[in-house]
Amino acid sequence: MRNSAFMTLIAIVTIGCVASVSSAAPAQTNAPRSSPSTAAASNSAPVTVERTAPAPSSPMPQGPTAPPDLARITVKERNHIRVEIELERNPLPAGQVSWVKASVTNEGRTDVTWFHDGCAEPVSVHGVSQVAWPMGEEHQGQAGMFKTYALGGSIAAAPDPHGMLSFVEKERISTGSTGCADIGISETIKPGKSVKTIRWWSGFTDPQRALPAAGPTTIQGFAGYYWRGKEPTDITDHVIKLELDAWIISDTAGARLSPAQAVDAGLADATFATYLDTQAIANGRAEIAWYDADQNLWEIGVMPWYETEPPRIHGVLVDAVTGTIIGPLDRPWDEKVDPFP
């Protein structure tokens, strides 16, 4: 593998990490977040798109009415490189595991180069809810900082009110996605051959593990980086993006607190508010807002990384329906089942 490609990938990974922090937290709005453009790069070959395979009917929880015959498969092809993603079902039931299959096929007569990082995802797939959650109250000082960071915002940007659906390896259904090694790996896809993967959605949003709002959702695929022939000057031009209109159905999500409302309920507890005043928010600490579906409650708290081994989460337990404080939260972080804050 050539040094230029390796250095290019390092730059791409670095830029991608920075972009993911800012893009995860756009300014608050009640309008659905716009989806990235699926247009091909200006120096690429023409793109064709197909939408096929309506979802089979099956009994599922009822929420807002989903459109009939939603597609489960979307395909895009560029320069005889065919990318396909297929949902197990559409609509997607909240709170239930569903898979997505993704593949990239070389339909040309010459080799295709696939250049990727340590995760080696042929197609990265995620979903974005188009229904905004209620964002609750505005807080000042420590409480305001805690709410911002617990909901995925930062000092520079407010939290996003739209739930994110992550499709991950099956063994990471509970913990969610992780980072990738900043390395450049080159593989060859021979004519007629494919690279394929299956990933799973937990049925909950990432990273709060909340039930997503019922309604429209956009499934997005990102296939990079693939090219035919000599190494391009800019490999970031060689991404194929595709989208699929989907729908979330749920007969319970509407009765639950949104992540922001759950944080508001926790902040209303005087004991937790006093504890927050002793904490350096976002400095050696993780701000926790996680939904526990088994117990139907929210865990709202702070986890200092270096006070204990393993670190412990301190806070309150909030009833997911009423917002009532039902007890203190004081438990160790379990890296095998908990998200990485």
Image (cartoon, helix red, strand yellow):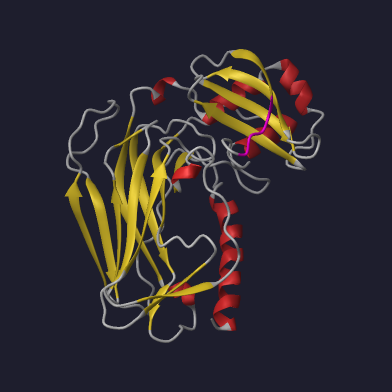
Q: Main secondary structure of the magenta part?
A: loop
Q: Is residue 37 left or right of residue 281?
A: left
Q: 205 and 86: which one is in front?
A: 86
The answer to which quarter of the image holds residue 95 is top left
Residue 140 in view of the camera: no
Is 94 above or below relative to 105? above
Image quadrant occupied by the C terminus: top right
The answer to which quarter of the image holds residue 180 is bottom right
Please tell me which residue is depicted at 81% across the width and 35% down the height of the picture.
307
Q: Is residue 270 left or right of residue 69?
A: right
Is 1 above or below relative to 82? below
Please tell me which residue is depicted at 57% across the width and 41% down the height of the picture.
159
- Please provide percent x and percent y for residue 278: 82, 29
Residue 204 in view of the camera: yes
| Residue at the farthest bottom position | 230
Q: Magenta stretch: residue 109 in it?
A: no
- The span shown in magenta is 331-335
- Please provide percent x and percent y for residue 326: 61, 12
- Please provide percent x and percent y for residue 38: 35, 62
- Please provide percent x and percent y for residue 283: 77, 43
Please tell me which residue is depicted at 27% across the width and 69% down the height of the picture.
77
Q: Is residue 200 left or right of residue 267?
A: left
